[in-house]
Image (tube, rainbow, N blue to C red):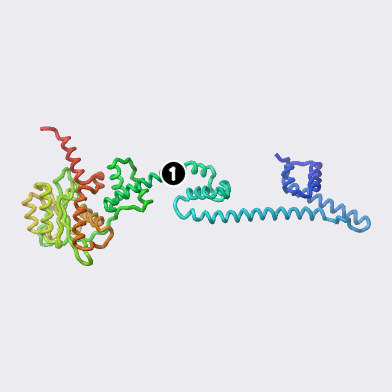
């Protein structure tokens, strides 16, 4: 450690050593002696002042002329050394600042997005050969130990990135098979069905990074035209869109299919509340009662019998017509109706309609022509039961869910 108190002999020797070595600097000599540079400088200045005073006294008492060296010559030399040292320090500082400026300009391109800390590490890795890790970490404000830890984990990160790339490829295959309609939950269910153990959050992250996403719901346009004079049926559902078993409770509704600039087709559906299975449907160019009758008859053919089942609809004139009431009575179906103007009372049917249009139109305003509309609807409506996974069914298809629950109920029922 440097001494806190220095003897007069030490100070004199230090000053004499400085004066005997013209090429040395105060800072270097102070470092050699273990003395603070400013302390040594003060000793030299004091000695210069003493020498100047002594010289002046000798000149005044003698011939009246100054010595050849002149007064203050030692002080001038010390001041010159100090100025040179300060200039050298300033030049070094300027070079450091210029280097720092250049480094930060280059680093700015790395910070455009993503994880800022990872970007800093990557910049250090890319430029360490020129500037050195220590210098770069100081400028960017990161710890060297953290950088080295990040660097050591590079093989594991690359392995994860390669795995994500392969996963993104499989997700694209699923998206292609489902017309790009599946979001992360259904994609996850499909991957698990294919034997992969995977987390939904990872699927969502990979889809987001790859720019893949499912379709979103759009606002539905109402097609219900109530008939105030028609007979009404009571609400037997009460917004409880569930059923303990298949073929017990159904919902029915009508939606439109936009075709071309001004044309429309209309789709009537009958959906089982137990499995969400589409048991009956019909498409026509009109919304007359025949449309909903055709959907009801299709459901009868699917189930074999609808005797004792409840069919819940809105108050559209097709469902309140005498012809439809007669058809329900002959089929053994009990009619149920929602409140007028309340979409929530038939929410499941409306949700189905919205999903149908979202996934068939794919963001377009309308189908090109009637043929395209019919063929697209035909494909989607059949795939809905056999391929499309339903979130309310544990991401099973409606038919798969019916089969699994039927098997479970048969297992629980004791043999006769």
Q: Residue 400, how many percent across, how many down?
A: 20, 43
Outermost residue on the right side: it is 63
Q: Which residue is depicted at the point 27% across and 57% down?
A: 362
In the figure, is residue 203 to the left or right of 331?
A: right
Tag 1's secondary structure?
Answer: helix
Circle 1 residues within 10 Å: few <14, some 14–19, many ≥20 = few
Give above or below for 382 relative to 258. above
- Position of the N terminus, as image quadrant, is top right
Q: Residue 404, how many percent across, how many down?
A: 20, 40
In the figure, is residue 198 to the left or right of 333?
A: right
Q: Which residue is depicted at the point 73% across and 45% down?
A: 30
Q: Residue 290, how many percent across, how many down?
A: 10, 59
Q: Residue 4, how many percent across, how many down?
A: 73, 41
In the figure, is residue 403 to the left or right of 178?
A: left
**Depth check, front residue: 6 or 95:** 95
Outermost residue on the bottom side: it is 262
According to the picture, the residue beneath numbered tag 1 turns out to be 157
- Position of the C terminus, as image quadrant, is top left
**Depth check, front residue: 244 or 356:** 356
């Amino acid at each position: 450690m440097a001494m806190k108190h220095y003897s007069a002999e030490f100070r004199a020797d230090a000053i004499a050593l400085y004066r005997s070595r013209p090429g040395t600097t105060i800072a270097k000599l102070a470092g050699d002696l273990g003395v603070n540079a400013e302390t040594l400088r003060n000793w030299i200045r004091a000695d210069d002042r003493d020498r100047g005073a002594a010289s002046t006294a000798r000149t005044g008492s003698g011939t009246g002329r100054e010595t050849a060296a002149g007064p203050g010559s030692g002080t001038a030399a010390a001041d010159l050394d100090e100025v040179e040292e300060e200039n050298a320090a300033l030049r070094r500082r300027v070079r450091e600042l210029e280097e720092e400026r250049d480094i930060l300009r280059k680093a700015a391109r790395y910070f455009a997005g993503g994880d800022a800390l990872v970007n800093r590490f990557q910049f250090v890795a890319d430029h360490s050969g020129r500037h050195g890790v220590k210098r770069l970490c100081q400028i960017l404000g990161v710890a060297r130990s953290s950088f080295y830890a990040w660097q050591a984990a590079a093989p594991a990160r690359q392995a994860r990135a390669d795995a994500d790339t392969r996963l993104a490829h499989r997700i694209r295959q699923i998206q292609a098979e489902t017309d790009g309609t599946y979001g992360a939950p259904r994609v996850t269910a499909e991957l698990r069905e294919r034997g992969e153990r995977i987390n939904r959050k990872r699927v969502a992250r990979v889809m987001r990074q790859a720019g893949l996403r499912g379709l979103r719901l759009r606002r539905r346009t109402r097609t219900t035209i109530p008939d105030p004079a028609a007979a009404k049926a009571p609400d037997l559902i009460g917004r409880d869109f569930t059923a303990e078993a298949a073929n017990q409770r159904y919902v029915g509704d009508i939606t439109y299919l936009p075709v071309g600039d001004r044309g429309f087709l209309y789709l009537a559906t009958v959906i089982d509340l137990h499995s969400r299975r589409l048991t009956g449907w019909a498409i026509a160019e009109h919304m007359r009662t025949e449309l909903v009758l055709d959907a009801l008859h299709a459901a009868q053919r699917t189930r074999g019998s609808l005797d004792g089942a409840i069919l819940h609809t809105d108050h559209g004139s097709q469902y309140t017509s005498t012809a439809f009431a007669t058809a329900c009575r002959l089929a053994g179906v009990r009619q149920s109706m929602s409140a007028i103007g309340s979409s929530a009372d038939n929410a499941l049917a409306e949700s189905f309609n919205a999903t149908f249009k979202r996934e068939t139109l794919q963001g377009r305003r309308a189908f090109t022509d009637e043929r395209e509309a019919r063929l697209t609807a035909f494909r989607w409506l059949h795939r809905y039961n056999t391929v499309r996974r339903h979130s309310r069914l544990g991401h099973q298809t409606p038919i798969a869910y019916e089969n699994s629950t039927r098997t479970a109920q048969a297992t629980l029922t004791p043999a006769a």
